[in-house]
Amino acid sequence: MSGSPYAPHTDAETAAMLETIGVADEESLFDIPGDVAFDGEFGIDARTERGIRDECARIFARNDDATEFLGRGHYGHYVPSVVDHLADRAEFLTSYTQYQPEISQGFLQALFEYQSMLVELTGLPIANCSMYDAATALAEAATLADRTRSTSGDVVLVPEHLREGKRAVLENYCAGADLTVESYPMDDGIADVDALADRVGDDVVMVYAENPTLRGCIEENLAAIGELAEDDDALFTLGSDVVALSVLEEPASVGADVVVGEAGALGLPTSYGMGLGIFACREEHLRQVPGRLVGASEDAAGDRAFTLTLQTREQHIRKERATSNICTNQAWVALRAAIHAAWLGPDGLVDLANDCVREAAALAGRLDDLSGAAAPVHDRHHVREFAVRTDQPAVPIADDLADAGFLVHVVGEHLLQVCVSDLTAGRTDDLVAAFEEVI
């Protein structure tokens, strides 16, 4: 590392450390197999800027040109150019964590506004300034429940319809906390409250529900689910997203203790895995919130100022007192979501959400008119997405649709799931025509 600006050791200092350790050189500290060790050559021919652009264009041209009617937790909406123009400013783009408030007031205020938007959407008084994604936010809610609930239970109840990846992350966290994840049944796309009532007991530490559900249905039983959780002192955690929350029941009004989910529906293009997690909760859980909270305070002159008020991760406090081992944050992504939400404004956000309801209903009706298809499968109101039952097996239909340039989810032997948003609404005529042809 001699000469490195990040490890400024002189040759003499490096030699002294190696001698103390008892090795001849720095390479001796690593055991790297020869067939994967760097041999000093990258094997990449030098190119001009134009040559690199041409090569990239050839590579990108190999991608399939398809319209994605995909959802199930990952949603794309049109991101206005103002988001890029503002978020790409150097003072935002190069910032990591805003440890020094005296030089980070602008970013800290933006994160404070992001938290304030979540508070307004959820009705809960506390929101942190970002999580990795919806899956880790859900997992953090489970460990919070384990720390805070008086019940001796160790079971986390989740809907039968839960995205596989989200459940896997939850189970990974729960394994370390000696918690068990179990499912409760669904009834026509929403929670089976009677079955849930039969299962909830003093062994349950958290009950999780989603609105909309994984099938895109608006959950009608939230208040009843909240009452069941409260009766057995279990934490009631609700999953949603920032767009849907603008028109659905306020989580606080149905008894939610914690709200988790995705905020990446705003500010991010379709990013194939990267997200932005929501975490909001009641004030009694303030000191158990994972990650960081931005607060408003006053500086020495008495002027309003912003700072990282609460930081409960192990890098900031003693490990045994930490609530989470989150090692980074999504501050820049949260900034983008806040800019997008501010650009839309309250009315624009509601209009976007209502479009998601109307477009889904309209597309489901058109597919239902086709011979060999029935939609929506669940007799419910939907947000963005819905299930389609097909007379023919679903997999070959999805494959034929992909060949025609349209991607949909396969969720059962004769079940497809279709998601429509403002980005894809202009292609619904072509999708319906392709459906009619392939079925």
Image (cartoon, rainbow, N blue to C red):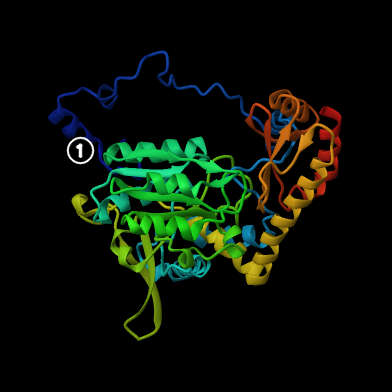
Look at the numbered disc 1 and give the secondary structure of its residue: helix
Rendering quarter of residue 299? bottom left
Out of 364 and 76, give the one closest to the viewer: 364
- For residue 11, say whether it is visible: yes
Three-letter amino acid code of the residue under disc 1: Glu
**Vertical side of 415 occupied by 111: above or below:** below
**Vertical side of 389 occupied by 34: above or below:** above
| Residue 407 in the image, given as x and y percentages of width and height | 71, 34
Q: Residues within 10 Å of mark 1 (few under 14, many from 20)?
A: few
Badge count: 1
Rendering quarter of residue 2? top left
Residue that mark 1 sits on: 13
| Residue 382 in the image, given as x and y percentages of width and height | 66, 52
Rendering quarter of residue 56? top right
Out of 233 and 49, give the one closest to the viewer: 233
Instruction: Please give left or right for residue 394 compared with residue 169 in the image.
Output: right
Instruction: Please give left or right for residue 272 compared with residue 348 in the image.
Output: left
Quadrant, the C terminus: top right
- For residue 89, say whether it is visible: no
Residue at 37% over, 39% down:
181
**Vertical side of 205 occupied by 399: above or below:** above
Quadrant, the N terminus: top left
Out of 146 and 38, give the one closest to the viewer: 146
| Residue 195 in the image, given as x and y percentages of width and height | 45, 44
Furthest-left residue in this view: 20
| Residue 99 in the image, given as x and y percentages of width and height | 35, 62
